[in-house]
Image (cartoon, coloured by chain):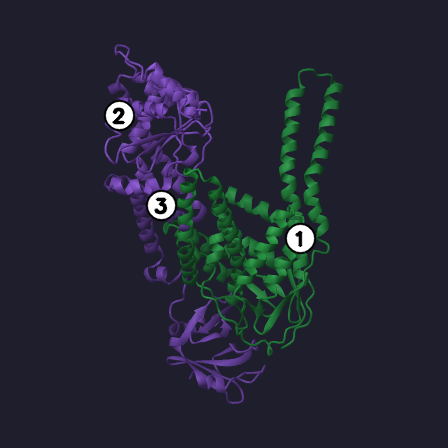
Amino acid sequence: MDAYSRAAAGAPNRAVRFTGSWRDYLPIAATNALLIICTLGIYRFWAAARQRRYLWSRTEFIDDTLEWTGTGKEMFLGFLIVVAILAPFFLFIQFLFPALVARGKAEAAGGIMFLFYIALIYLGGFARFRALRYRLSRTYWHGIRGGSDNPGWNYGGEYLGRLALSFITMFIVYPWAATRLWNGRWNAMSFGPLQFRANLTAEGLKGRWALIYAAPFGMLFVGFFLALIGAGFMAASGGGNTPRPALGAIFIAFLVLFYVAIPLATLHWYAKYYRKAAEATSLGDLEFSFDATTLQWLGLFLGNLALAVVTLGFGLTYWGYRNWAFMVRHLHVYGEIDVSDLTQSTTHAPREAEGFADAFDVGAI
Amino acid sequence: MHRARRKGSPTPSTSARSDALLSGRLYDGLTAHPHEVAVEVGNGGLVLRQEGGWSEAVDAALLKRLDGGQDSLRLGRSDVAGWRLVVPAEAEAELKPLLGRQDRYGRWIDRIGLVPALIAGGVITASVLGIGYLAPHWIAPHVPMGWERNVGSAIVGDFGDLRCRNAAGQRSLEALVDRVAPGARDGPNGIKVAALDVGVFNAAALPGGYIVVFKPAITETNPDALAGVLAHEVAHVRRRHVTEALIRELGIGALIRLFAGNVGANAEQIVSLSYTRENEAQADSDAIAMLKRAGISPRPTADLFTRLSSEVPQFSAEFLQSHPLSAKRARNFAASFDPRATYRPALSRDQWDALFDICAKPVKPT
């Protein structure tokens, strides 16, 4: 029973399965929502812990479920620590900025703001690293957990540098930045004695990235074409008074297309990015793949949105559930793992939980 | 016991069938290897056995119940990270007496129960919001003006190059304040008024008794309307509305934004919006009274508000309050017009000319 043979994707004996159901989860979602409202939001840390305990325990990996051992208390304390660190800065800036502007020192105020944003981006990268590290350290399988010995300070710098480079190049080099950052994060992570290996390159991701720049122009072309057809149609029908509303409608449709084209193209890129990222990542002899297409991602987001609207906001409590189920259902794992060799992680278990990630509102993966 | 367990770590075995009550799967927290064990429920704890003679007793006090999915019960040990015993869910009845209550909502909620927690939380939340809503209003009048002046001058300074420094214009502006609110500029805590060379139509009361008027509020109005606007700002200062806003911004607003994220920000916005309206209405009625006492017609102010309410004011600096203009506010001013009263212009022709040029750069003698 120590070795597991390759599990075929989609087969009933897939290596990763999600076995939760929305009905099972309903009592958790409902009580979480109530408690969050009744505690001025303080309960949200405990709510997150309960949600994860449920989701992890309904996620089967090979022959056993995952287990979440993080607590609401540690996430709350982590958040308080981060607030204690950041609040003075925010307060300082809140006073300093208007004070400088009021004294006519707009350049100094701008400079301070610039430095402030630099610091925020650095901390945002740091936060993302720490969130991943924290989540792995609280995730158990067969009584073994993951983690990292890297504190993530360097990663924050790498994040800032690569993002700055992307910004300077009008994000043309972003695919390189994003893939290197993925590697930077995951190569520092481990599970038990096994090191994650990530070797993602921008290979195959450049075309779709170029599409993001091309999308608005493509839509412009389509819009122009539509306008031409519309104009031709109106000229043919000979209506002298009608063109105004018709042209207005075309203009609006064109505007919508313009603003929808870029997000859609970006989603199209991210869909491929995550597929390639999973493929480029391994843990010991385990290899991963992820098969969500752009349309499936779109379905997830639109579904989340529709659910929240239809349930007058209550559906928001299901977003975490739906996102997790989506990730697990599209994730495939291949290869073998020797459970006798999978010894307990020796990494330091971080104590500050996800305070920084929480403060900067960034995800872990 | 901890040491003994490690010494006698069970050997891998897949066939552990004995006459014990339950069979379970044990992870020892050292490796991921599962060990099939027989579980015996004894007094005060569990005894785990394996063929070959290995056995271990675990004290019930160390056991904690973990989330184990639908068809299994998962136990952990508080003294060994990663130690897990997985038994079939049917074993729950037998094991229940040994196990404490399972963590459900978090310990602080479990201790008092969900419903009492919801009620207590609701009451506390309502009181915090209530106090947060009212406290700035109660506290503001008791904040010493000296403190506010210090905060104000720290924030505001001398406005640098933004300030319009034409001396004659400044005298006219001060004369206008004196006309609507005699004595308001007296003393160390008196009102300080300044015109700023900013191309947005606005006027604002700032912490520390500062009143600023932006250039278009001078060049695009007339003396009587400007008197109405200034009276309104003087009322904000006198009623300590600025202090109130400052406390609200730093106090409850920061607290709610901290914990509640977006939901709270929206809630806070509603609170501060309704509050602002209340204060605005009060400042308006004060201003109307001031105009009346000064013998200045309220009509030009009403006309100004009517005109502005049809435009969209654009302004977003943090500390400068913007004033939601509405037709209703204009009507209040218009309604206070008394046809029998004798109104006098707020400023003389010369004073107004000087004020009009307050932002003009002084011509250097050559």
- Compare residues B253 and A97 and report the one nearer the observer: A97
Query: Does residue A102 appear in this view?
Result: yes
**Type of residue at label 3?**
Leu
Tell me which chain the residue with mark 3 is part of: B
- Where disc 1 sits, the SS reads helix
Q: Residue at x 42, y 49 (%)?
A: A90
Q: Colour of chain A?
A: green
Residue picked out by circle 2: B181
Label 1, on which residue? A175
Neighbourhood count class around disc 3 (C-alpha, 10 Å): few under 14, some 14–19, many 20 upward: few
Residue B177 on image: x %, y %: 30, 25
Mark 2 and mark 3: Cα distance apart in space: 30 Å
Where residue B44 appears, as percent x and y from the top left, is 37, 79
Q: Is residue A157 left or right of residue A247?
A: left
Can you identify the residue that label 3 sits on?
B250
Tell me which corner region of the image, top left, top right, bottom left or bottom right, holds residue B291: top left
A103 relative position to A274: left or right: left
Q: Is residue A324 above or below residue B78?
A: above
In the image, which disc is placed on residue B209? none
Residue lying at 39% horizontally and 77% vertically, measured from the top left: B60
Residues indicated by labels 2 and 3 sit on the same polypeptide chain: yes
- How many angstroms separate mark 3 from mark 1 (CA)? 41 Å
On the image, the x and y values in percent for residue A82 come to 43, 57
Chain holding disc 2: B
Which quarter of the image is occupied by the N terminus of chain B?
Answer: bottom left
